[in-house]
Amino acid sequence: MSVKFEISFAKSARLSGGLAILLKDTDSELPAGAESADPAKVFAKAARIARFTAKGLSSLDIVAPEGSPVDRIIVIGTGKAKELSAHDWLKLGGGAAAKIRNVEKVAIFIDVLGGETEAKAAADFALGMLLRAYSFDAYKTKKNDDEDKNGTQKLVKVTIVTADAIAAKKLFAASQAIADGVILARNLVNEPPNVLGPAEFAAKAKELEKLGVEVEILTEREMRRLGMGALLGVAQGSVRPPRLVIMQWKGGKPKDKPVAFIGKGVVFDTGGISIKPAAGMEDMKGDMGGAAAVTGLMHALAARGAKVNAIGVIGLVENMPDGNAQRPGDIVTSMSGQTIEVINTDAEGRLVLCDALWYTNDRFKPQFMINLATLTGAILVALGNLHAGLFCNDDKLANELTTAGLATNERLWRMPLGKDYDKMIDSKFADMKNTGGRHAGSITAAQFLKRFVQETPWAHLDIAGTAMGSIQDEINQSWGSGFGVRLLDELVRRNYES
């Protein structure tokens, strides 16, 4: 981040210098308190000259407005405010944040709805501001205009003026926790691979203990005792030893079965002996986007005190083409006892996940398991950067995930599973092979994982197109998007908190 927002809520604001942002509905006048920012009614004349109609996310910038106690006024159009979704309010907040430059204090007048709905809108607006403000520049020595010469973030004090400021403040506490979870996930994905190895990632997860999360870290020796031959096979070519991290948040009733989230954490993926092309390989530092999302989610749940028992398990490895690396044709034995013929060492994520899934299911007996993974390029061919692939063995869970995706705009598209696809990964020499070939690549990867979940409700989210290098928008300008944190927090909040 180059700018840091300190956000508060108030019923009114005493203006003196700085910036005032006014929200304007197409069907109404300016917010009730706006006359304090524009006593000379400069806006009316400026809007007429600029033909400003308050279309959604449009803006009108008035510098040094006559008679105003502030130095600058920006009016942002909401469209028809009563028709806006929660995500629309996030976008408005992000749009507003993008316009805040070289200023120390901002007053934002948001009275366009009234009542409880407005308090929620104000909290969503503030969340959008926090998400948009994020940038990853930790390794840049030349700082921008929003930082001092020491590289310290400039603090901008933001007051959001709304009728029910107390309710908005209460709702924003949860939004702040979610923002922090998303930012943690983004930071993890954006870190360079020489800095963030399996042990370093595990140490970042260990920091969640400050929030009350119980964190265990299994080493290579402990995983070998458990029989995790699939995960260890991926790791054996790297000098950096693997880790399995188990995070537990116990916010529900003691007798409640937990919900479980499992993340693929390949901190760098060369493809192993089945090495990838050189062009674009630097992006494979983001092949741990699933593990980053699970870690960010556990942060969000703990920070907002979610009333649920939640498990987060991440398998952390590096896939390298060392002389000790596994070979195409090797057969490994997973923790489940099932054997796997490794056809392609670049189909490594499913080998990590299969042991993590089996471990989670066997130890915790969860209500459901959801794994997230930047698993296949094939999902990008199918869905691009706009949807993550959803594979699921339970219609109820699939519907809940789809609904949560629509609410957060972290959208999912359900893909098929079936026995006929399952035949594509049968092996002549082992119980299965780790790839079914080029056709239906995302589906056969999901079929592989399905063999390790037994009867537990389970969903696999293939986030290869959404966790990194995804489309930038009003609330995300980062290469690492943090996709999955808001989605799964919404799933839990809607359906599983006691």
Image: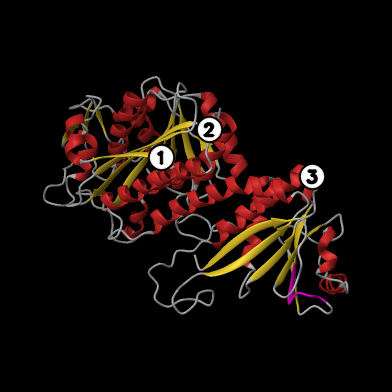
Which residue is nearer to you in this view: 489 or 323? Answer: 489
Residue 465 sits above or below residue 1 on the image: above
Mark 1 crowdedness (10 Å alpha carbons): few <14, some 14-19, many ≥20: many
Q: Which mark is residue 307?
A: 2
Q: Real-space Cα distance between discs 3 and 1?
A: 36 Å
Q: Which mark is residue 370?
A: none
Q: Looking at the image, do the residues carrying marks 2 and 1 touch, with CB atoms under 8 Å apart?
A: no
For marks 3 and 1, the one nearer the N-term is 3
Q: Secondary structure at mark 1?
A: loop
Extent of the magenta region = 68-74
The residue pinned by badge 1 equals 213
Q: Is residue 397 magenta?
A: no
Residue 165 pos. (x, y %): 72, 51
**Is 390 displayed left or right of 332 in the figure?**
right
Q: Amino acid at mark 1?
A: Val
**Is 6 displayed left or right of 424 in the figure?**
right
Which residue is nearer to you in this view: 20 or 80? Answer: 20
Residue 392 pos. (x, y %): 46, 29
Q: Which mark is residue 115?
A: 3
Tell me, yes or no, if residue 445 can be seen here.
yes
Residue 119 sits above or below residue 494 on the image: below
Q: Amino acid at mark 3?
A: Gly
Q: Amino acid at mark 2?
A: Lys
For marks 2 and 3, the one nearer the N-term is 3
